[in-house]
Image (cartoon, coloured by chain):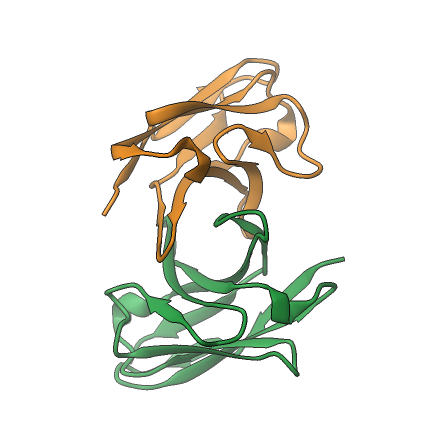
Amino acid sequence: EIVLTQSPGTLSLSPGERATLSCRASQTFSSSYLAWYQQKPGQAPRLLIYDASSRATGIPDRFSGSGSGTDFTLTISRLEPEDFAVYYCQHYVTSLWTFGQGTKVEIK
Amino acid sequence: EVQLVESGGGLVQPGGSLRLSCTASGFTFSSYWMHWVRQAPGKGLVWVSRINSDESSTHYADSVKGRFTISRDNAKNTLYLQMNSLRAEDTAVYYCARRSGAGGFFDWWGRGTLVTVSS
């Protein structure tokens, strides 16, 4: 079973700053199987990125994903007020779906 | 527009049972695999179960195997999760999620229903 470790646990930034979130896998897998989700308090998760670097429909281009092997990154180029939330990475493969523990992006 | 609406959550005693429903609209429900994901209060997301489009295949997390049963009624556009032998650690918001047709990620989620297991 692949374990996903996200870092940092909390990221304190100001609007307009760049956010870099990390997701590290316990073993190498195909980069096609990594997604990122955003979750705001009291809301359902929302798909941001799939296949490591493809933006989901309607997601602003300030969100970008990259990485391969065991190291993946979600970058928010310039934080908007609505971007302060918790972000989860997810690995998906037939009959196995694993989430990281989440990174909270909070207003500094 | 795609919509997933969960229902059936509530307070149940340890050892009790509950059946969750997820009603889908805005897409051809019978064409998609569906999943249940849960989130304990203040915690992260945990995958629970999935079912393929024609109900011929199901899969469960080890933590719920033998206690939970996923099913669907494609004629009613509804996904179910029958939960038996509930434990305090099953307390969570339960989300239904649609597996994308383009890959194993989840492209639509419901708003969730809260299950509380407590005496």
The vertical placement of A4 against B115, above or below, is above
Residue B110 lies in quadrant? bottom right
Chain rendered orange: A
The vertical placement of B55 against A17, above or below, is below
| Residue A71 in view in this figure | no
Q: Quadrant of the N terminus of chain B?
A: bottom right
Spot occupied by residue A54 in the image (x, y as percentages of width and height): 58, 31
Between A1 and B38, the one lying in front of the other is A1
Residue that appears at 71% across and 63% down? B27
Residue that appears at 55% across and 31% down? A84
In the figure, is residue A3 to the left or right of A55? Answer: left
Residue that appears at 57% across and 43% down? A47
Residue that appears at 63% across and 64% down? B4
| Residue B51 in view in this figure | yes
Chain rendered green: B
Spot occupied by residue B9 in the image (x, y as percentages of width and height): 48, 75
In the figure, is residue B110 to the left or right of B62? Answer: right
Residue A5 lies in quadrant? top left
Q: Residue furthest top?
A: A17
Q: Quadrant of the C terminus of chain B?
A: bottom left
Spot occupied by residue A79 in the image (x, y as percentages of width and height): 59, 21
Spot occupied by residue B68 in the image (x, y as percentages of width and height): 34, 77
